[in-house]
Amino acid sequence: MATAQPLAGKTAVVTGASSGIGREIARQLGLAGAHVTLAGRTRDAMDEVAREIEKAGGVARVVALDVRDVAQVRALVEGAVEATGRLDIMVNNAGVSFPSKIAEADPEEWRTMLETNVLALLAGSQAAIRAMRACKAHGHIVNISSIAAQRRDSGVYGATKHAVNCISATLRTELEDDTIRVVNVMPGAIATNFARNFDPAFLEGFAKMTGVQTEIRKGERLPDEVIAKLQPLLPQVLGNADDVARAVLFAVTQPIEVNILDIEIRPAKQLNLG
Ligand SMILES: NC(=O)c1ccc[n+]([C@@H]2O[C@H](COP(=O)([O-])OP(=O)(O)OC[C@H]3O[C@@H](n4cnc5c(N)ncnc54)[C@H](OP(=O)(O)O)[C@@H]3O)[C@@H](O)[C@H]2O)c1
């Protein structure tokens, strides 16, 4: 029988929990009863979700960190284990995209994508495996990839997500004899701050549609109001972070024998954001 708190007694860590898909996953895991550690760079946004979880009777911790630093990712997982004695769910979600052409890009953008989208996910997975084995968890590692991993010409960002698919599949094989399942999630275009490093003119067009007056600065987050108003205006091409979070919640509440490999989730029409 389904319970209202299917994740009661479980511990979860979510990276990139200060915005978009990660924030919504953290919220839903917390409301489903998990003790959640939210990790990201913008503390205020995470504090707000933590308060919402606690208001509903749950427990949440907030850790501000840079996932590009392997030591900080390890400390993040260790902190969750210290607080609760266990780890059951690790969501490696933090990610960035710089869409520049390879011939023109700043190599620092490649470094940022590789360190955030690949290195941090590897470090998070390794730390999670050790923690889950130590407490004999029926655990789930959830890696947020992208539909960009399905195109061969999806740029350096796409290359990082091809790497995520490969890492997820490899981990799944390595963990066959453990009680740890690996769920690889490939979202399509979802209304979040994902496009923060895109050409501001591209974003200005979208912001204008919402009627919200805001100045778009490359690399900076959009007001939540813009994102919330934009998605319902373009439901055919833009999905909700909530849709992805519900899929993740479904996967991590299955019995450990149920091996959900990949989840591809996107709006009806595909928009290739790269
Ligand atoms: N939205 C889409 O269309 C889409 C499609 C396919 C896949 N994805 C994937 O979904 C995941 C979440 O992206 P999103 O769409 O939710 O974008 P988002 O709104 O920009 O959220 C990205 C999250 O990652 C965090 N982050 C980035 N670099 C970090 C770092 N060095 N250290 C710590 N946290 C860091 C951000 O923190 P701050 O906001 O605090 O800086 C934010 O919480 C990413 O892996 C992305 O590649 C998104």
Image (spheres, helix red, strand yellow):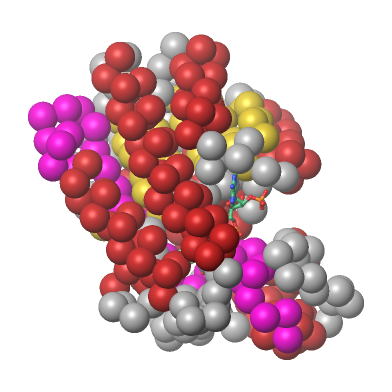
* Identity of the residue drawn at 53% across and 37% down: 69
Q: Position of residue 226 (x, y in %)?
A: 75, 71
- 183 is within the stretch colored magenta: yes
**Toward the viewer: 187 or 202?**
202
Tell me what residue is drawn at x 50 percent, y 56 percent.
111
Question: Ligand 1 is found in which quarter of the picture?
Answer: bottom right
* Quadrant in which the N terminus appears: top left
Q: Which residues are magenta?
A: 172-201
Q: Position of residue 120 (x, y in %)?
A: 45, 43
Q: Residue at x 13, y 42 (%)?
A: 173
The residue shown at (73%, 70%) is 218
The spot of residue 102 in percent (x, y) is 47, 78
How many marks the image carries: the answer is 0
Q: Is residue 205 left or right of residue 237?
A: right
**For this rendering, which residue is in front, 59 or 115?**
115
Q: Is residue 3 above or below residue 238?
A: above
Residue 176 versus residue 58: which sits nearer the camera? 176
Position in image of residue 195 (x %, y %): 61, 71
Residue 50 is at least partly visible in this image: yes
Work out whether 53 lies above or below 28. Answer: above
Residue sitting farthest toward the left: 177
Does 31 lie within the magenta span? no
Q: Is residue 266 visible?
A: no
Residue 161 image-quadrant placement: bottom left
Answer with the quarter of the image where residue 124 lies: top left
Query: Which residue occupies the foreground of this view, 128 or 258?
Result: 128
Is 262 situated above or below 190? above
Above or below, comparing residue 146 to residue 27 in the picture? below
